[in-house]
Image (cartoon, rainbow, N blue to C red):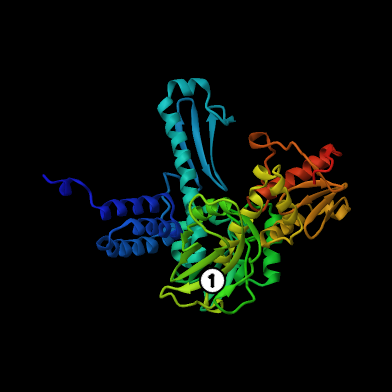
């Protein structure tokens, strides 16, 4: 037997890798990134097959949100597993949870010692099922959010059965705003968590379209209405939707300079870019979405492991044939999602490094420059969320929310970095982290910096004056 007969071909190994990528993450961008990396290593005779198969898997990736298994849960989203004198009760509401119900009806977070000792297999099975449920919900969430860039639209009958009425998916779907096509070209936005769907008299046809609501398609008043409702319900959405950054560049050609001139830490940008599906090509970052590729320039050489500071350049759009793609010819949501991805890279490169570099003299000089820059789109949404969360204190006059800072009892908290100063001097706060931190389930979306600002405000409200570091601002 020859070596060629026992050694799997590169194509077979590459296809196995692509299928593993699809199983781990249903986002089309992740599949494209993996395919691009494999194609660069492939021989010319392998590339044609790989290109065709990768395109097929990208098309499969989008609808994966409709393929959630029920894992044995009942229509009410509950599964009960007898374990001796106790019963493991798994529930899927906003999140998957496991509790233990005793024969007397009392509920505990962990099984009694006799149950653990006498029924270890049942206990292990219940805990394993909880892990599978949470993993499935995470996969669903990624698939739904990834559908924005792909323009995913569901049939109403499939959406009702596979998402809105599904025992595992329902808790995720109900916290999202959806648009239902009630008539050709007429879309009605609904939030299942707010109560019965506000639909016309007749239920939409089974083939009617259903898509996720996106702020780029909404008016200013509509965005404000949904954000007010999310805040009033104290609803934490599975991913940022009502408060999602959206972008409508003023340019009409294939180039936008809306991020030009920002200083970024290269290693922070590259670290996040890989996870977002960007590739390094000719000293630029490239992201393929549908039949379009966005190219994002950073002054200087880009390569894996590059470090240092660099200035952000323009974002350039190209069609699949390499010709320029005018911004005005791109779907508003797709364009917004591409620019949002760029903004996340710029934000990460500008501010996320602060904790690790803030005590370096040169980095502090850069930080001081960033400190005076206007807030980006993400920072402005963070301010909008804080205005709603801290409405009582703002109305009382104790908290003042400025353009770039939140002011409380003489302290300034920067909304883009979280840095706290008093009379220009840096203030060190020992905020609790991890399990010691107070949960903040009322925040409208999950973001580390938003949580840090709210924890900082809570700390200052409870503890008052904090010693500050003179001359270190």
Asked whether residue 341 is in view, the answer is yes
Question: From what the image shows, is residue 118 above or below residue 261?
Answer: above
The reply, left or right, for residue 101 in relation to residue 4 is right
Image point 51% across, 21% down: which residue?
113
- Residue 242: image x %, image y %? 64, 61
- Residue 160: image x %, image y %? 48, 61
The reply, left or right, for residue 222 in relation to residue 116 is right
The reply, left or right, for residue 406 in relation to residue 134 is right
> Dot 1: what SS?
strand
Question: From what the image shows, is residue 26 above or below residue 319?
Answer: above
Image point 62% across, 68% down: which residue?
247
- Residue 162: image x %, image y %? 45, 57
The front one of 173 and 414 is 414
Crowding around mark 1 (Cα neighbors within 10 Å: few <14, some 14 to 19, many 20+) is many
Question: From what the image shows, is residue 451 above or below residue 123?
Answer: below
The front one of 312 and 81 is 312
Image point 41% across, 75% down: which residue?
321
Q: Which residue is mark 1?
A: 316
């Amino acid at each position: 037997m020859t070596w060629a007969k026992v050694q799997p071909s590169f194509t077979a190994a590459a296809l196995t890798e692509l299928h593993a990528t699809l199983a781990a993450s249903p986002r089309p961008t992740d599949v494209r990134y993996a395919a691009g990396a494999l194609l660069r290593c492939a021989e010319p005779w392998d590339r044609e097959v790989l290109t065709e198969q990768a395109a097929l898997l990208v098309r499969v990736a989008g609808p994966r949100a409709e393929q959630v298994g029920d894992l044995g849960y009942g229509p009410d989203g509950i599964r009960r597993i007898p374990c001796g004198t106790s019963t493991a009760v798994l529930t899927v509401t906003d999140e998957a949870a496991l509790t233990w119900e005793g024969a007397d009806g009392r509920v505990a977070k962990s099984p009694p010692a006799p149950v653990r000792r006498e029924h270890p297999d049942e206990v292990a099975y219940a805990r394993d099922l909880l892990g599978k449920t949470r993993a499935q919900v995470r996969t669903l969430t990624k698939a739904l959010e990834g559908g924005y860039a792909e323009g995913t639209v569901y049939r109403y009958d499939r959406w009702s059965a596979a998402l809105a009425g599904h025992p595992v998916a329902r808790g995720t779907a109900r916290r999202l705003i959806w648009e239902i096509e009630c008539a050709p070209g007429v879309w009605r936005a609904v939030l299942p968590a707010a109560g019965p769907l506000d639909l016309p008299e007749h239920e939409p046809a089974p083939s009617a379209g259903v898509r996720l609501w996106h702020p780029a398609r909404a008016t200013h008043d509509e965005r404000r209405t949904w954000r007010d409702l999310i805040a009033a319900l104290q609803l934490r959405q599975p991913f940022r939707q009502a408060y999602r950054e959206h972008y409508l560049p003023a340019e009409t050609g294939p180039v936008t300079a809306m991020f030009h001139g920002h200083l970024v830490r290269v290693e922070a940008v590259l670290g996040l870019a890989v996870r977002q599906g960007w590739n390094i090509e000719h000293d630029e970052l490239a992201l393929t979405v549908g039949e379009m590729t966005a190219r994002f320039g950073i002054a200087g050489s880009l390569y894996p492991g590059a470090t240092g500071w660099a200035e952000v350049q323009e974002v350039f759009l190209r069609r699949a044939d390499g010709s320029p793609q005018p911004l005005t010819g791109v779907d508003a949501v797709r364009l917004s999602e591409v620019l949002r991805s760029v903004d996340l890279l710029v934000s990460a490169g500008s501010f996320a490094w602060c904790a690790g570099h803030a005590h370096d003299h040169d980095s502090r000089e850069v930080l001081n420059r960033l400190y005076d820059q206007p807030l980006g789109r993400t920072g402005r949404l963070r301010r909008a969320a804080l205005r709603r969360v801290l409405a009582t204190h703002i109305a009382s006059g104790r908290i003042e929310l400025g353009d770039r800072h939140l002011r409380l009892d003489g302290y300034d908290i920067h909304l883009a970095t979280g840095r706290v100063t008093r009379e220009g001097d840096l203030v060190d706060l020992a905020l609790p982290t991890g399990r010691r931190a107070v949960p903040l389930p009322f925040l409208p979306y999950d973001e580390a910096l938003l949580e840090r600002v709210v924890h900082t405000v809570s700390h200052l409200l409870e503890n008052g004056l904090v010693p500050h570091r003179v001359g270190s601002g």
